[in-house]
Image (cartoon, grey):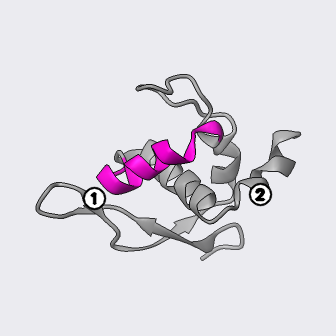
Amino acid sequence: MTGDEWVSGMLDYDKTDDNHRKLPSRLAIMKPEQLQLLLVREMPYGKYKGRLLADLPGHYLGWFAREGFPRGELGELLALMYELDHNALRHLLDPLRST
């Protein structure tokens, strides 16, 4: 692991169960720049299309956690935002909003 990576406790949701829901399989490595991406990337589809990922409501993130996150970078960012929201850590993004 390099100095700019750390284990976040965020789960990796690559495996699926019999109902095709994604299941946590291992701890993922989170890069600090992913926090900044939450403040610039917008939700590309759905009810909250166009809203910053950092501003998605907790119930919507919880739905993804139950039903499965999309694959790829979007899914990783949504899973990270879910972890921040679920653990009441949204405030960690506040200093980054002003940069």
Q: Which residues are magenta?
A: 55-69
Q: Can you identify the residue that label 2 sits on?
A: 92
Q: Quick one: 32 or 11, which is closer to the camera?
A: 11
Label 1 is placed on what type of residue? Lys
Q: Can you identify the residue that label 1 sits on?
A: 22
For image coordinates 34% across by 55% down, the residue present is 66
Coordinates of residue 67 in the picture (x, y in percent): 30, 51
Coordinates of residue 97 in the picture (x, y in percent): 82, 41
Check if mark 1's residue and mark 2's residue have beta carbons within 8 Å.
no
For image coordinates 45% across by 68% down, the residue present is 11
Coordinates of residue 74 in the picture (x, y in percent): 46, 42
Q: Is residue 24 above or below residue 51?
A: below
Question: Which residue ends up furthest to the front in the rendered image?
Answer: 59
Residue 63 magenta? yes
Magenta segment's dominant SS is: helix
Q: Is residue 25 above or below residue 81?
A: below
For image coordinates 62% across by 59% down, the residue present is 84
Q: Which mark is residue 98?
A: none
For image coordinates 58% across by 38% down, the residue present is 56
Q: Earlier in the sequence, mark 1 or mark 2?
A: 1
Residue 62 magenta? yes
Identify the image quadrant of residue 25: bottom left
| Disc 2 crowd, CA 10 A, few/some/many (<14, 14-19, 20+) | few
Is 73 displayed left or right of 54 in the figure? Answer: left
| Image quadrant where one finds the N terminus | bottom right
Q: Quick one: 74 or 93, which is closer to the camera?
A: 93
Give how far apart the Cα atoms at labels 1 and 2 are.
Answer: 27 Å
